[in-house]
Amino acid sequence: MVSPIRPTDDNARALAKSLIARARFATLSFLDPKDGGPMVSRIALVSGPDGLPLSLMSDLSHHSTALKANPLCALLIGEPEDKGDPLTHPRLSLRARAHFVRHGTSGHGSLADAFLSKQPKAKLYIGFADFALVTFAPLGAHLNGGFGKAFTLTAEDLI
Amino acid sequence: MVSPIRPTDDNARALAKSLIARARFATLSFLDPKDGGPMVSRIALVSGPDGLPLSLMSDLSHHSTALKANPLCALLIGEPEDKGDPLTHPRLSLRARAHFVRHGTSGHGSLADAFLSKQPKAKLYIGFADFALVTFAPLGAHLNGGFGKAFTLTAEDLI
């Protein structure tokens, strides 16, 4: 059987980075802290100052509680357009480790500025004590650029 | 702290069912068979004859291999519209157990007809030996109907 995975090239790296750069939300896959089972949520997501994913989460959310117990997660980034087959639209499945950045800790200000530059309406609640910014350190990724265009990316390919 | 979860009512059940009924794709959260870590993929998804989610998967896909090793998974169903805040758009996070229905096994024909009635272009490959239909038996769900409209649903609420 021929592998459906192509060798990673600069076009694949650029596509992966552009999917993160254009994102305004994403789907988060994480583990239930009670039983270790897979769970899923939609989250706000933009690209941070380093071009890597950046989110803003309420402490009330299931996924925030779960990521504090186990920061390993995966993000699906890249939304289909209205027209055409949604499964041919490029998307990035990124495995990552989440890191919470709370008010008053180093780096919060510049991350908050980056988040608000892309999600200005979050100004209403980004200052609340029970909201935290969340960065995602990539562990590896699978890029599906459409039919016959699959790539395996390393963390280095995304940095 | 006041719970953000409202009591489940008929409106919540109807909204959850309508999200499944309108779906043409979804996001699948599943476990890596190698290390048990969370992973995520976009999959084709429609409502089956019983109103529950139905997918069509290639044996070549990561998620197909993973679900055969461990059928526990979660689906995010309900896509944002072009306008407005994507996080206010209703979506269903459904925990489920995946079940593969292969060619020549009981029920394949009626499930294939249901899938093709909503995804007619799949006619090109639904007959391939390395494609299988996949049903999802619900274990429970979280419905987010927009700001302040969160519900916890049981499997019975969806059937």
Image: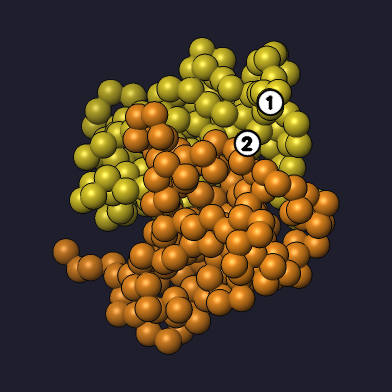
Chain colours: A yellow, B orange
Tell me the tag on residue B60: 2
* Image: B102 above or below A8: below
Q: Quick one: which residue is furthest to the bottom in this view? A: B10
Q: State the SS at label 2.
A: loop
Quarter placement of the C terminus of chain B = bottom left
State the image quarter where residue B152 is shown: bottom left
State the image quarter where residue A29 is shown: top left
Tell me the tag on residue A75: none
Q: Quick one: which residue is furthest to the left in this view? A: B1
Q: CA distance from mark 1 to mark 2?
A: 10 Å
Say if mark 1 contacts mark 2, CB within 8 Å.
yes
Q: Is residue A10 visible to the viewer in this orientation of the structure?
A: yes
- Write down the residue under mark 1: A1
Q: How many marks?
A: 2
Q: Chain of mark 1?
A: A
Q: Amino acid at mark 2?
A: Leu
Judging depth in this view, the residue of B42 and A42 nearest the camera is B42
